[in-house]
Amino acid sequence: MANSLKVAVIGAGVAGLTAARELQRESHQVVVFEKSHRLGGTWVYDPQTESDLLGIDPNRDVVHGSLYKSLRTNLPRQLMSFTDFKFGEKLYDDPHINPGHEEVLKFLEDFASHFKLRELIRFSTVVTRVEVVESAVTAFVVESETSGSSSIEVFDAVVVCNGHNTEPQLATDIPGIETWSKKQMHSHNYRDSEPFRDQIVVIIGSGPSAIDISKEIAAVAKEVHMSSRSTRFKVAKSENFNNMWQHSKINCIKKDGTVIFEDGFSLEADIICHCTGYKLYYPFLKTNGIVTIEDKRVGPLYKHVFPPQLAPNLSFIGIPEESFTFCIIECQARWIAQALSHKVLLPSKDEMLIDVEEYYQEMKEKRVPEHKTHYIGFQTSYIEWMFDQTGMVLEKPLKDMFEYFNQCLMSAGVDGYMDAFSHKYPV
Ligand SMILES: Cc1cc2nc3c(=O)[nH]c(=O)nc-3n(C[C@H](O)[C@H](O)[C@H](O)COP(=O)(O)OP(=O)(O)OC[C@H]3O[C@@H](n4cnc5c(N)ncnc54)[C@H](O)[C@@H]3O)c2cc1C
Ligand SMILES: *[C@@H]1O[C@H](CO)[C@@H](O)[C@H](O)[C@H]1NC(C)=O
């Protein structure tokens, strides 16, 4: 039976656009709130940086985007596709397997035009409050602001798609770092390597941003020293650069500015760049404690999507980290849309809560830290499960492609996986 609801979607990035599309397909009435004047979220390159380069000051003017100028995708374009709207088949100005960010934005704009999503979006409208109101039926008050005036509306359901690459997570557990007087920044505010010319730079982190940014900086800096908390790394000079070293964690920072690593090495650095990821951040969300956010864990969330107590009316898209984001976002969005129209039946509230508890328990047993709650990695079982919820299957050719990507990553490493992948799957 069709069940058409009034649904608010917060954000018009990949997640919000995909949600709008799937909700529309299920005949829900959709309003997408987007604080920017354009769609695309992360994929809109913004040359501006924040006044506070560490992003600590709560009163700073927040820049949403975290892209740097030279960024190319770290996934092959074929794996940044929707099932029936494929990036691999759409070539614009940059037909590389790993195109620059402009190309991804073009693809998303094309996606929005093709499925007539623009008319659902209220641009330059920021959501300031989403509050659960419990009366006869549970509903959501959504307060938003556009050009200085605010308005309040009530919705049956809310899909949260505000992104999670904006609020810097810093390496704050380093003794002495708060009082260090030289320059510090977070990769959120990195745009190009020019400010690092002839500098001695310490880069904290070992994720994709740390790797990309350090290589770019090494071309102009005097020295680049990477520091990682991962025990995989030992002090080592980079093979490809004669001015780059890999170190363990920073042990402490002295008052005179000396940075001392756990491996005993010490140096006087000019800049520390934190490539330490982002916090999950939902400043507008008021759920009376039904949903909590702690150390990168939003909980409880059934399969990283629904808070059991408010399911299916409140949902989150795109929380899983370091994964095949576009595909995951698409199947989550379809699941949500069909759960809202009662095509898909969710387990009971208690069953969902138990599922989350079991998941947390399993994490504990495997000694997975809490901040990895939504870390899914490049596996396909989550995607397959998600497809199955709406009666779809992850087609074999696509599944093979995902799995082959994984193999390439493991065998060819960060410098070689893209080439390795493109030998078998050229654009
Ligand atoms: C540096 C970097 C590189 C990446 N590279 C890749 C890659 O190569 N391949 C890949 O697949 N993924 C990559 N990603 C992951 C990327 O985050 C996803 O591809 C995708 O953009 C996530 O989309 P989203 O819709 O969840 O969030 P976003 O794209 O961040 O969109 C969120 C939207 O919500 C809006 N918004 C936020 N708060 C409010 C509010 N209160 N009211 C109204 N609107 C609001 C924002 O303006 C924004 O438009 C990368 C991420 C980063 C940071
Ligand atoms: C979800 O919203 C619908 C429509 O307003 C309502 O009938 C239902 O009770 C709500 N469910 C929950 C769990 O709040």
Image (spheres, helix red, strand yellow):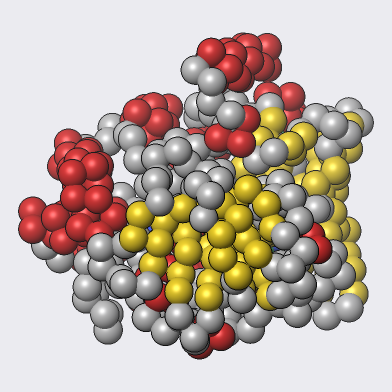
Is 367 situated above or below 269?
A: above
Q: Nearer the viewer, residue 320 or 241?
A: 241
Q: Nearer the viewer, residue 43 or 85?
A: 43
> Image quadrant of residue 422?
bottom left
Q: Where is residue 107 drawn, in percent x and y?
A: 37, 71
Residue 220 against residue 401 in the figure, above or below:
below
Total numbered circles: 0
Measured as percent of width and height from the top left, residue 357 is found at 63, 15
- Quarter placement of the C terminus: bottom left
Please indicate whether residue 88 sits to the left or right of residue 377 in the image: left
Residue 44: x and y, percent? Answer: 52, 75
Placement of the N terminus among the 4 image quadrants: top right
Res. 422 in view: yes
| Location of residue 234 in the rendering, given as x and y in whole percent from the top left corner | 39, 46
- Visible in this render: residue 122? no
Q: Residue at x 35, y 40 (%)?
A: 378
Furthest toward the left, the residue is 423
| As drawn, 263 above or below 48 | above
- Residue name at image x 63 percent, y 48 percent: 251
Taking depth in this image into account, of 153 and 285 the one nearest to the observer is: 285
Give the left or right position of residue 105, taking residue 61 as reference.
left
- Within the image, what quadrant is residue 267 found in? bottom right
Between residues 189 and 166, which one lies in front from this camera angle?
Answer: 189
202 with respect to 172 (left or right): left
Identified at 51% across, 55% down, the residue is: 265
In the displayed structure, 182 sits above or below 5; it is below
